[in-house]
Amino acid sequence: MRRLSFKKRIPLLVRITSGLLVALISFVGGFFLIMILWMRALRHPEFRERLIRFSKQTLNPNALKIAGHPASAYALIQHVGRHSGRTYATPIVARPLGNDFVIPLPYGSNVDWCRNVLVAKTCTLTWNGHDYTMDQPEIVPPEEAIGAFPLVTRLLFTAGGMNQYLCLHRQQETPEELPTHEDIPFSLPTI
C-alpha cells in the first residue's frame, strides 16, 4: 500500500490558515519587540534628545491638527511657559483614570511642557472633543497610573520600562464622569 505524502494528507485550507496564523503572530510579535526596544532606547540621553528635537520640529506640528478631537489618539494640553508666560499647545497621549488624567512620560519629566505644567500647577486638557481644566499635577509611579491603559498598552509600557507618568487632577466644576479604558476605542500609544 502506498502512503500519501504529508502535503496531500493535510487539506489546503488548513495549510493556508496555519500559514496566515504564523505570519500574524510573527508580525505582532515583531511589532511588540520593536516597540519595547524603542522604549528602552529612550533611556540613552543622546538618542532621547534627538528624538525630542524631531518630535518638536516634525511630529508635533502634524499631530496638533488632530489632537483633542473625538476618536483621536492624541489629547491636547495647553500650558503657560514658566519663563516666557506664553501659552503653548502640545499634543500628548492621555487616558482618564477616575476623575483624573494620566499621561505617560516616555521622554521623562524633564521635557518643557511637563516642567511648565508642574510649575504653573494648572493647564487645560482637550480630550475626546471636551476641554477640562486640570490642576495639582504630580509625577506618579507606574503602579498608580497603569490602570488607565488597556492591557496591551500596559504590557508594552511595563516591558519597555516606562516608569514616569504625570497625573492631572480635574477641577470639580463639572460633575461629568469620565469613561474608563474599556469605553475608549483601542489605540496604541505613540511615543
Image (cartoon, rainbow, N blue to C red):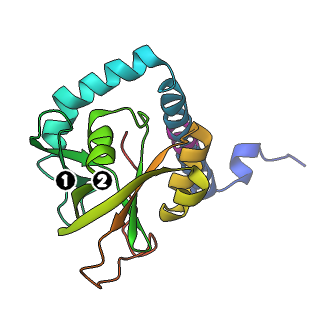
Identify whether 147 is placed above or below 3: below
- Residue 183 placement: quadrant: bottom left
- Residue 84 placement: quadrant: top left
How far is the residue under mark 1 from the one under mark 2? 22 Å
Q: Residue furthest top?
A: 46
Residue 117 in picture, x, y percent from top left: 28, 47
Q: Earlier in the sequence, mark 1 or mark 2?
A: 1
How many C-alpha atoms fall within 10 Å of the one at disc 2: few (<14), some, or many (≥20)?
some
Q: Label 2 belongs to which residue? A: 121
**Label 2: element kind:** loop
| Numbered circle sitting on residue 75 | none
Q: Is residue 140 magenta?
A: no
Question: Residue visible at 50% across and 24% down?
Answer: 41
Residue 179 in picture, x, y percent from top left: 38, 77
Question: Residue visible at 13% across and 37% down?
Answer: 61
Is residue 98 rendered to the left or right of residue 124? Answer: right
Is residue 2 rendered to the left or right of residue 21? Answer: right
Q: Main secondary structure of the magenta part?
A: helix
Question: Residue visible at 79% across and 47% down?
Answer: 4
* Viewer-side label of 1, 2: 2
Question: Residue visible at 32% across and 42% down?
Answer: 114
Residue 133 in picture, x, y percent from top left: 23, 66
Query: In the image, which residues are magenta?
Result: 26-31
Figure label count: 2
Identify which amino acid the numbered label 2 is placed on. Answer: Lys
Q: Nearer the viewer, residue 4 or 160?
A: 160
Q: Label 1 belongs to which residue? A: 67
Identify whether 52 is placed above or below 155: above
Identify whether 168 is placed above or below 98: above
Visible residue check, residue 128: no
